[in-house]
């Protein structure tokens, strides 16, 4: 099929290996459907510099550059990791598709193949995420967590093949979905069950944005990628983030889990066999930064579930436990 407007669908994404891999995989189905697609890598200030992301205004710099390319008409659609997308809507832009979710779980990669429980005391685990730091320390207060930055390859290298000037790490925690999409899923030593280790809101979900005045055929093609289950889960998880006014500094874990504890919703990448499982439940968990305490809230997944878990968390003192925006 040739799109009536422009002939082919131009899709912008970040130039990182992960962004290109996940965008290309997402669009394989669109191409198979006969639509001509061009992936356009968009380089942002955050990709060009080694300055800290905070000095550039946080990870929002990537999203902003992509949105500029969309609004100027350089591309017809943009693809982000949904977990990197601010919860506030952007004028002129529409979240047109939340495609089927990949593995939402965090993954541990260790140099020796040891699981988290088997790492020696004092082992050094790298992560830049306050949530992951709290979760590691909660499970293993005897480990050392090192703040690390960089793309997936850089972080893996620190464990699997450290260079002379790197401090070697014994382990890193990364999103399983990112490793899978890069074809590196085989390096994972352990994937943490969501009920024990809820992850970032919308982890493993991609987000496709279009202009709100997009041509009908662009809207149709992109809309085909939307997945009702991913949309319901990502929407509720992001609503928790929004209501808590939590940024990436908040040690907050959110997940949609099976109504029965200790079981994730379906095996990774599979469609949930709805008939066999209890109704899905929204789980939100706020940690103390050092992992010594945590507060949980759960509600059956649905339109009111985010508000219900947030009220429960706040009533239980979550705003005193951890740095959230709400109540400050
Ligand atoms: N914060 C960066 C980021 N944004 C999305 C992913 C992974 C892919 C996804 O969650 O969809 C990652 C890497 C990571 O957390 O290990």
Image (spheres, rainbow, N blue to C red):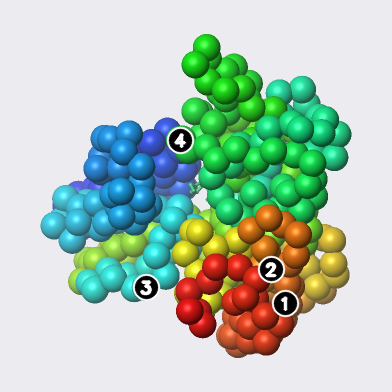
> Disc 2 versus disc 3: distance between alpha carbons?
22 Å
Provide the residue designation for mark 4. 150
Say whether disc 3 or disc 1 marks the residue closer to the N-terminus: 3
Residue 155, percent from left and from top? 54, 31
Q: Give percent across and percent down for residue 258.
A: 78, 68
Query: Of circles 4 and 3, which is in front?
Result: 4
For numbered disc 1, what is the local secondary structure?
A: strand
Measure how far apart labels 1 and 2 are at the Cα level: 6 Å
**Residue 13, relative to residue 219: is it above or below?**
above
Residue 79 percent across, percent down from the top left: 37, 52
| Residue indicated by mark 2 | 285
Residue at 68% over, 64% down:
287
Where residue 312 sits, quadrant-wise, is bottom right
Mark 2 or 3, nearer chain start? 3
Q: Which residue is mark 1?
A: 297
Cα–Cα gap, marks 3 and 1: 24 Å
Secondary structure, mark 2, is: strand
């Amino acid at each position: 099929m040739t799109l009536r407007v422009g002939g082919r669908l131009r899709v912008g994404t970040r130039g990182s290996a992960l962004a290109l891999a996940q965008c290309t995989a997402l669009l394989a189905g669109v191409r198979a459907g006969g639509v001509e697609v061009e992936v356009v890598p968009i380089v942002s200030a955050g990709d060009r510099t080694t300055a800290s992301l905070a000095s550039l205004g946080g990870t929002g710099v990537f999203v902003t550059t992509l949105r500029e390319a969309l609004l100027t008409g350089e591309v017809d659609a943009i693809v982000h990791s949904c977990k990197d997308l601010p919860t506030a809507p952007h004028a002129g832009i529409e979240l047109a598709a939340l495609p089927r979710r990949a593995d939402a779980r965090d993954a541990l990669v260790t140099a020796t193949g040891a699981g988290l429980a088997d790492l020696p005391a004092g082992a050094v685990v790298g992560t830049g995420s306050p949530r992951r730091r709290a979760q590691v320390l909660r499970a293993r207060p005897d480990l050392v967590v090192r703040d690390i930055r960089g793309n997936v390859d850089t972080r893996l290298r620190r464990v699997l093949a450290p260079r002379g000037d790197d401090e070697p790490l014994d382990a890193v925690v990364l999103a399983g979905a990112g490793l899978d999409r890069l074809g590196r899923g085989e390096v994972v030593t352990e994937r943490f069950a969501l009920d024990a280790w809820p992850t970032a809101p919308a982890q493993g979900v991609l987000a496709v944005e279009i202009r709100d005045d997009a041509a009908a055929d662009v809207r149709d093609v992109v809309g085909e990628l939307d997945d009702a289950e991913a949309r319901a889960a990502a929407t509720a998880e992001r609503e928790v983030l929004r209501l808590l006014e939590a940024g990436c500094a908040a040690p907050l874990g959110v997940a949609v889990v099976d109504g029965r504890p200790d079981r994730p919703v379906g095996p990774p990448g599979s469609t949930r066999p709805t008939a066999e499982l209890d109704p899905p439940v929204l789980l939100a968990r706020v940690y103390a930064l050092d992992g010594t305490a945590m507060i949980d809230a759960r509600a059956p997944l649905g339109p009111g579930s985010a508000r219900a878990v947030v009220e429960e968390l706040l009533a239980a003192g979550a705003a005193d436990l951890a740095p959230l925006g709400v109540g400050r």
